[in-house]
Image (spheres, rainbow, N blue to C red):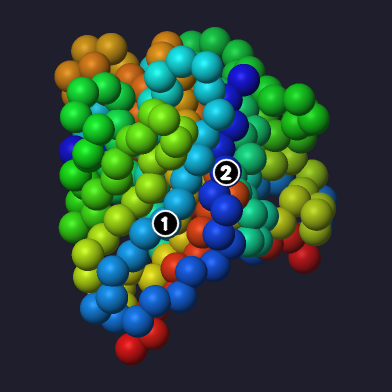
Amino acid sequence: AQSVTQPDIHITVSEGASLELRCNYSYGATPYLFWYVQSPGQGLQLLLKYFSGDTLVQGIKGFEAEFKRSQSSFNLRKPSVHWSDAAEYFCAVGVQGSYIPTFGRGTSLIVHP
Amino acid sequence: GAVVSQHPSRVICKSGTSVKIECRSLDFQATTMFWYRQFPKKSLMLMATSNEGSKATYEQGVEKDKFLINHASLTLSTLTVTSAHPEDSSFYICSAVPSERELGGTQETQYFGPGTRLLVL
């Protein structure tokens, strides 16, 4: 079975600073990888996903993530954070043929002005 | 595209009453929908998989008789919390997966609704 770890419960950055949220997964084959964002009291919005091909994936809102097989990682990055990016971020790992990914526990992003 | 709505967005009810939450895919057909429960500061817990025209598949530990799921059409699934108690208070989120013909084969991607906050007094 697959699993996913988000080692950071909270991340605090200043507005305008760069951001990297960590995600590590465990799965025997090539996984499907997702990043979702959840604003307070809201559902989850898909930021980006990796199924195959180019390991650097561009998403919405200026986010990108890089799949590194050797490190079993799929870290989310943004070069310059905006105050509106403050939210909960979930990494998820899925497998081919399954609709049900496994979610990480989430990382809460706090943005200081 | 791929918009999922939930209604109501929040509901307060008395203990012992039943509450129905609707999940709709607005611009695509969804053969499969999912219901999640999210506790404060916690990740999502999958409750059940809802398949159009057939019985839902419940995850271990989720009471079928308490959380009734109906997926009557390709765009609507409902979750009914029966005889609700304060411990059922939570944030319930649904998601939908486009059916095979839709959205160019993104079947492994779930699209989430905005969630429903349930408070049982």
Q: Chain of mark 1?
A: A
In the shown orientation, is residue B88 left or right of residue A47? right
Q: Secondary structure at mark 1?
A: strand
In-front residue for pair B116/A45: A45
Q: Residue drawn at (22%, 64%), measured in percent from left and top?
A: A79
Residue B7 visible in the picture: no
Furthest residue in direction front, as rendered = A70
Numbered marks: total: 2
- Where is residue A91 shown, x and y percent of the image? 46, 44
- Name the residue beneath numbered marker 1: A21
Q: Amino acid at mark 1?
A: Leu
Residue A13 visible in the picture: yes
- Where is residue B24 shown, x and y percent of the image? 38, 37
- Name the residue beneath numbered marker 2: A5
In the shown orientation, is residue B18 left or right of residue A82? right
Q: Quadrant of residue B105?
A: top left
Q: Amino acid at mark 2?
A: Thr
- Where is residue B103 shown, x and y percent of the image? 19, 24
Q: Residue drawn at (26%, 22%), measured in percent from left and top?
A: A52
Q: Chain of mark 2?
A: A
